[in-house]
Image: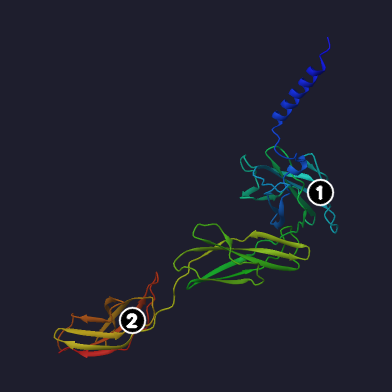
Amino acid sequence: MRPSRGAVMALGLAMATVVLVGCGKRGPIVPPERRLPSSPAGMSARVEDRSITVRWVAPRNRVDGTRLRDVTVMRLFRRDEAPDAAPKPAMLSGDRVVGYQEIARIVLAAPPLPGAQIDGSAATFTDDKGLVFGQRYSYVATAEDSDGRSSAPSPPIAVIFLAAPSAPIGLVAQAGDREARLRWEAPATFIDGSPVTGEIRYLVLRAAGNGDLVPVTAAPIAATTFTDTGLVNESPYRYAVRGVRVDPGGSATGPVSTPVTAMPADTTPPSAPTRLIAIPGAGSVRLAWNASPEEDVALYAVYRAEGRGAFTRIGTTPAIATIYTDRDVQSGRTYRYAVTALDRAGRPNESPRSNEAVVTVP
């Protein structure tokens, strides 16, 4: 028995109602490709020792401009390039990049991949497998969201894997007052054993105490000497140096030299006190003098000699006081006095002696 026309229309209306309710449609349909993550940006690469470190920034938005909050996987790809050819555009095919080899798959929720580091939205990876000195390499990165949708590859970054300089030798550090003076010898070879040619510059590294060595120089320097100023006296510092090859095709930073240690110290004595006078009294001699002008004076030392004898230190007084009374004297004897200033250095520096004051105790 065939259903009536009214029954068919009622059934169709019911099905349409189910479809409309089920889809929960609130706006226009968005094409799937517009929901893909944008490509990673900020690609850079540098040669360090026997590796290439690549850095990039994960996308913050999708292709349609909406916020991307669920990057879960980042991939890095590499390919060999002809020496003088421009990097070829990278094309995604599934989860691969055509013509490139995947060298790192970084799952953000998993334990860190060896050689990878995540710092906020920035990622770095140290590539040290299968590299050949003199070869040119291109790198691209992709990002995936929690639904497994992959971005297009980033613009490629190309780098020549140059042989870096060997570590500088003969590093010496001479400590001074709030400074350390460094000198070293230029390396004679690159790390592949070939003789050094072209320009070599240097990065100076410093660590306070047991901290990590970090660059002191904002950019590599050409000289084989460096003075590090503004240090804290009586605090140990470690220093090392790295050579940087500067070549028309790029640059390469070599290994760290053997570290050396320096401890800055104040070695400059204060000025001598002036205008020392001695006033004798019954069983005592009262001394007074003009202060040394330096702000780091901690003490004054008082010296006494009897007749023509040698001076002996008989006492000290804090820097705020410029008077001293010597009560260990005998009537009828003649004494000579002098005063020096000592600073606050770990090993105090002592000034020259003041003028001598001669007095006979009544």
At 78% across and 66% down in the image, what residue appears? 248
The earlier-in-sequence mark between 2 and 1 is 1
Q: Amino acid at mark 1?
A: Ala
Classify 10 Å Cα crowding around label 2: few (below 14), some (14-19), many (20 and above): many
Q: Position of residue 317 (x, y in %)?
A: 28, 76
Residue 90: image tag: 1
- As drawn, 323 above or below 150: below
Q: Position of residue 215 (x, y in %)?
A: 60, 63
Q: Amino acid at mark 2?
A: Thr
Name the quadrant containing residue 25. top right
Q: Is residue 247 visible?
A: yes
Classify 10 Å Cα crowding around label 1: few (below 14), some (14-19), many (20 and above): many
Tell us which disc is closer to us: 2 or 1: 1
* Residue toward you, 267 or 140: 140
Q: Secondary structure at mark 2?
A: strand
Q: Secondary structure at mark 1?
A: loop
Residue 340: image tag: 2
In this rendering, the count of numbered labels is 2
Residue 157 appears left or right of 275: right
Q: Position of residue 356 (x, y in %)?
A: 30, 89
Residue 235 appears left or right of 152: left
- As drawn, 213 above or below 153: below
Name the quadrant containing residue 112. top right
At 63% across and 49% down in the image, what residue appears? 117
